[in-house]
Amino acid sequence: KQEVTQIPAALSVPEGENLVLNCSFTDSAIYNLQWFRQDPGKGLTSLLLIQSSQREQTSGRLNASLDKSSGRSTLYIAASQPGDSATYLCAPNHGSGNTGKLIFGQGTTLQVKP
Amino acid sequence: DAGVIQSPRHEVTEMGQEVTLRCKPISGHNSLFWYRQTMMRGLELLIYFNNNVPIDDSGMPEDRFSAKMPNASFSTLKIQPSEPRDSAVYFCASSFRQGLVYGYTFGSGTRLTVV
């Protein structure tokens, strides 16, 4: 059974800092991995998707890496802003090529102080 | 595109009552997922459908929960009878796959409170 762990559970940083969120998963037989953002009281927004054959994926100030063999992924946020404050969730996909199920970690709650 | 539409946004019901949550996926998406989110357990996958067919319902907690997808544009999650421990936010999500490109969109959720 896939288990996903995200460290740290919570993080508070001053504006402008670069930061790294960590995700580890126990079953490396994944098809891809996604990072999502969730604002309080809202649904989830997909940020980045990394295919199992890729090492990293970038979108603006966000960079996600994947080391499938060791069961690890990181989300790097450059020059953090107060608008980045949210919960970030990691979700490996065991869909075997189909639009299969995502298993979520508990998330890292980020607060960026102005 | 209105996104994934869930109704109602909030539901308060008494223990023992039947609750029905509704979801309209994005047109053209061929997979639909029901998740439950609580503080203690985080986001849990309850069931998912591919092309309207249930593929994996191993996350459905017990027989009180049932889900249907009668057509590509509508799904329901029913709890009968409801219990206080069912209180959570229930999310519906839909997705597509085109080659290696995936799209995964979540609805805004239904906050269920069972008293």
Image: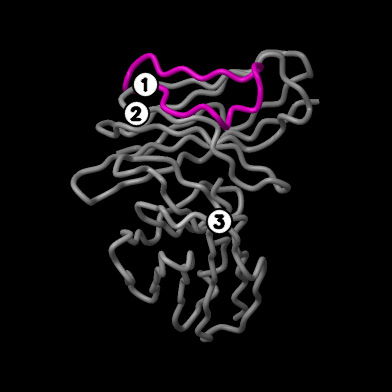
Labels 2 and 3 touching (C-beta < 8 A): no
Q: Residue at x 34, y 61 (%)?
A: A50
Of residues A46 and B31, the one drawn nearer to the viewer in this rendering:
B31
Secondary structure of residue under mark 1: strand
Q: Are marks 1 and 3 on the same chain?
A: no
Q: Quadrant of residue A107?
A: bottom right
Q: Residue A48 placed where, x, y %?
A: 37, 61
Is residue B60 covered in magenta? yes
Q: Residue at x 67, y 68 (%)?
A: A10
Secondary structure of residue under mark 3: loop
Q: Residue at x 53, y 80 (%)?
A: A19
Mark 2: which amino acid?
A: Asn
| First to last magenta residue range | B53-73
Q: Residues within 10 Å of mark 2 (few under 14, many from 20)?
A: many
Q: Residue at x 72, y 19 (%)?
A: B82
Residue at which label 2 appears: B50
Residue at which label 1 appears: B53
Q: CA distance from mark 1 to mark 2?
A: 5 Å
B63 relative position to A103: left or right: right
B70 relative position to B46: left or right: left
Q: Residue B96 placed where, x, y %?
A: 28, 40
Labels 1 and 2 touching (C-beta < 8 A): yes
Residue at which label 3 appears: A39
* Residue A20 in the image: above or below residue B31: below
Q: Are marks 1 and 2 on the same chain?
A: yes
Q: What chain does mark 2 sit on?
A: B
Quadrant in the picture for the C terminus of chain B: top right
Q: What chain does mark 1 sit on?
A: B
